[in-house]
Image (tube, rainbow, N blue to C red):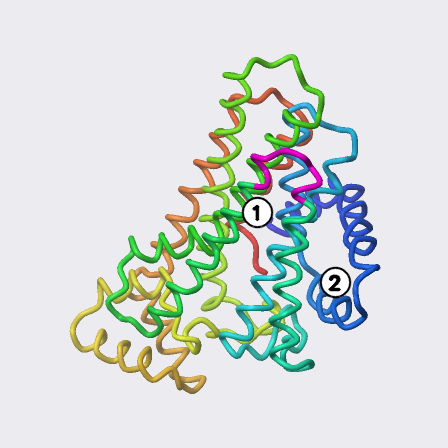
Amino acid sequence: MNQDLKTKILSKVKDDLLDIETALHENLAPCLDIVSDIAGHLLFSGGKRLRPLLMVLSARMCGCNNKNEIDFSIIFEYLHAATLLHDDVVDEAEMRRGKKAAHAKWSAPKVVLTGDFLLARSLTIASMTRIPQIIKIIAKITEEMSQGEIDQLARKNDIALTEEEYMDVIRRKTAVLIQGACRSGAVFAHGRGKNNVLKDSEEKKREKALSDYGYNLGIAFQMADDLLDYTADAITMGKNPGADLREGKLTLPLIAALARADRKDRLWMEKIIKASLFNENDFKNLTDMLYKYSGIEYTESKANDHAIKAKSCLDIFEASESKDVMMMLADYAVARKV
């Protein structure tokens, strides 16, 4: 079912994805060779382009369809790529999207500086919109994502991490970027799309609806991603299963299972978490416990709830192909296998 859904989505957005790809290539072309090489290593290694696509679809739903939205949508792919480059250095990750992580091919300082460049370039592009609100949104996203990663690093191997604290981490590290992409689409349409039919109150209503959609989609997407770390294989994921656990990251499947486990099983799970060194058999036993204590089932349920909430946020919009795609993206976020 999820493969059919993916195929259906791609058939509807193939032209937009090609345009986004072209814009990314053209924007990177004038850069130093080393910057283009490192950024391109990640940018052009099979990313979904979800975030720029959401900005484009959101702008279209708010009446903008003059192709300018494509050029500005790459802000969100640059932001996403920058965080991945930085995260992989911090986490000492070996693989990303089925390839060696960038810092395994170039030095860590070069990779970090390339990430810094992408963050700066995203703000430069934002300034070209001449819409102060978009510049403010991008700056706030950068601040929030940085805080989320710092908080996650500070809570490494912390078995006391609560579900509420986990939610705040994933809000900052994932949801704010997806939320910002959707919200910026609305702001861009109202500011540059020459859509003067709507009154200010109606514009604000649409902006909030898309912002709320993006938040819930982002939460659902990250929860599904956290599930894949325990349920997918290395080939499918493009990285080794159990990466989060090895990096000391407690995610919802584990937090929920720990809260339900009996004393003996909890102590064993805590030992694995604190050690961060485990063999294939240990990881299988741990995954079995996540099923035994409903950590997997609970996370699936929470992710589905947020996907449903995301779709309900679009009720105020008229029927359109962009709306159809965004509804399908919410379904795919929790049904995907990669």
Q: Residue at x 55, y 21 (%)?
A: 203
Q: Quadrant of the C terminus?
A: bottom right
Q: CA distance from mark 1 to mark 2?
A: 22 Å
Q: Position of residue 137 (x, y in %)?
A: 53, 41
Which region shows up in magenta?
126-135
Decide if residue 330 is in sight here: no
Residue under circle 1?
A: 332
Viewed as shown, does residue 232 lie left or right of 130? left
Rendering quarter of residue 276 = bottom left
Q: Position of residue 205 (x, y in %)?
A: 49, 22
| In the rendered image, the vertical position of residue 247 relative to residue 314, given as above or below | below
Q: Position of residue 333 (x, y in %)?
A: 54, 49
Viewed as shown, does residue 35 lie left or right of 112? right
Residue under circle 2?
A: 44
Q: How many marks?
A: 2
Q: Callout 1: helix, strand or loop?
A: helix
Q: Residue at x 47, y 59 (%)?
A: 146
Q: Position of residue 12 (x, y in %)?
A: 74, 39
Instruction: Inspect the magenta stretch and tell me whether residue 250 lies in it.
Output: no
- Give the mark, 1 or 2, whose residue is nearer the N terminus: 2
Viewed as shown, does residue 32 lie left or right of 144? right
Residues packed near mark 2 inside 10 Å, few (<14), some (14 to 19) or many (20 plus): few
Instruction: Inspect the magenta stretch and tell me whether residue 134 lies in it.
Output: yes
Decide if residue 297 is in sight here: yes
- Observer-nearest of 252 and 57: 57
- Inspect the image, locate mark 2, and give the three-letter code of the amino acid beneath it: Phe
Q: Residue at x 71, y 40 (%)?
A: 128
Rendering quarter of residue 223 = bottom left
Q: Residue at x 81, y 70 (%)?
A: 33
The main secondary structure of the magenta stretch is helix
Residues packed near mark 1 inside 10 Å, few (<14), some (14 to 19) or many (20 plus): many
Q: Nearer the viewer, mark 1 or mark 2?
A: 2
